[in-house]
Image (cartoon, rainbow, N blue to C red):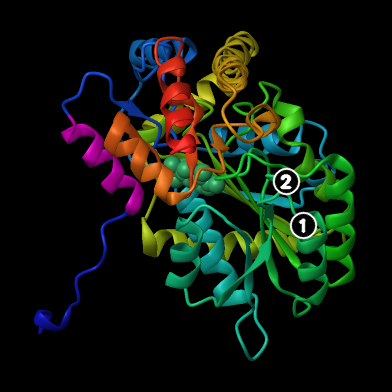
Amino acid sequence: NADVVPQAPEDALFGLMAAYRRDTDPKKVDLGIGAYRDNNAKPWVLPVVKKADELLRKDPDLNHEYLPIAGLAAFTSASQKLILGDESPAILEKRATSVQTISGTGALHLGALFLSKFYHTKEPRTVYFSDPTWPNHFQVFSNVHLPYKTYPYFKKETKALDFDGMISTLEGAEPGSIIVLHACAHNPTGVDPTQDQWKKIADVIREKKHFPFFDTAYQGFASGDLAKDGWAIRYFVEQGFELCIAQSYAKNFGLYGERAGCFHFVTASAADAESTVQRVASQLAILQRSEISNPPAYGARIAATVLNDKELFADWEADLKTMSGRIIDMRKALRSKLEELGTPGTWNHITDQIGMFSYTGLSEKQVLKLREDSHVYMTKNGRISMAGLNTNNVEYFAKAVDKAVRE
Ligand code: PMP
């Protein structure tokens, strides 16, 4: 009976959010959760999402019927184009199949489940995650019984990519391993490979016959440029890899709670690629049916409305620039405040890193000190969500860091 069930630890991030809510100090700063905030520290509904919402509400034919198992076709096809590019060889050659999922997490899960069933020898394949990575990766892949290892990613001394460590681990990994790659704006470090480094990574993956699995949660949100943030995936596809993509619309549409996402499977270029893709699609449909039956409609309708309309798409790109621009401004402000204060250490990594997060290099002890003394909430690994900073609190935060570092 259930008295054998052990107590599980609280989710670290959601626990942090609860502690922040309990804190009654008016100066408190939330740098934990990876969700965009405007300059007043408030959640932001993208203006283009409001517009799409109004359009949907006006539609007299809108109803609450089930979506198909694979989701809303207008959404999945637009999602393919968004991540692969309109002229992608994978789309033109019908080598891609896509399923609407419960946001990025659901896409990762569906992909992991599919690989655990269909991509193995006698033993299951090993999955490789970057060290560090988004902690949920471990749980999602372990739940479907895929063993995992990590590849070095972040060099503490330089607060930048450990490229040599990454390459040599990928070279030494058992051939055919599944390599999980953050497409852009790596979480938690904010450190991405350069295009030349991506090319080398692709070479090793090809040589060792590894299987690339891209996680893309920040396209457009990182740099404000959709093609730039999608570059690595598009490069791999052009190179003819068979690969998976887990795509989230949480951040770039601000649709966090609506759970809009997509899983894509792209097969390698081959004479029978189209039939391979159809067989893959048929299996994905069975898995989806048993897990969630069919995906939720609202978020996908919003995204599809925007993605399939030229004008709304342009509005969305402007909204992406608003979000990414504010975050880039906060990076500059934080770095210059710390440098002005003469805070011990170097702070160039704050502006070198990209996307939602900065890996500050603060120790766990300093993080806890910041929480106790200054009511600043961030994860123990020293990661801050840049979106939690604004013109009203960036100086306060910089001073708090300065104090913690000097103690
Ligand atoms: N992957 C990474 C690296 C992420 O940072 C996130 C969001 N925190 C996700 C996937 C998925 O998030 P969601 O399920 O909310 O789309």
Is residue 193 depicted above or below 212 in this figure?
A: above
| Residue at the (85%, 41%) spot, across then down | 195
Residue 146 lies in quadrant: bottom right
| Residue type for callout 2 | Thr
Query: Farthest bottom residue?
Result: 122
Q: Which SS class for mark 1?
A: helix
Picture coordinates of residue 43, whole percent (x, y): 36, 20
* Position above or below: 250 against 164: above
Marks 2 and 1, how far apart in space?
45 Å
Q: Quadrant of the C terminus?
A: top left
Closer to the chain start, of discs 2 and 1, is 2
Q: Is residue 133 left or right of residue 230?
A: left
Residue 169 % position (x, y): 76, 70
Q: How many marks?
A: 2
Q: Name the mark on residue 274.
A: 1
> Which disc number belongs to residue 158?
2
Nearer to us in this view, 221 or 371:
371
- Residue farthest toward the front in the current orientation of the protein: 407
Q: Tell me if residue 109 is in the magenta stretch.
A: no
Give residue 290's quadrant in the image.
bottom left
Instruction: Please name the residue shown 36% across and 56% down the image.
Output: 292
Which amino acid type is marked by label 1? Glu
Residue segment shown in magenta: 12-23
Residue 100 position in % (x across, y down): 50, 45
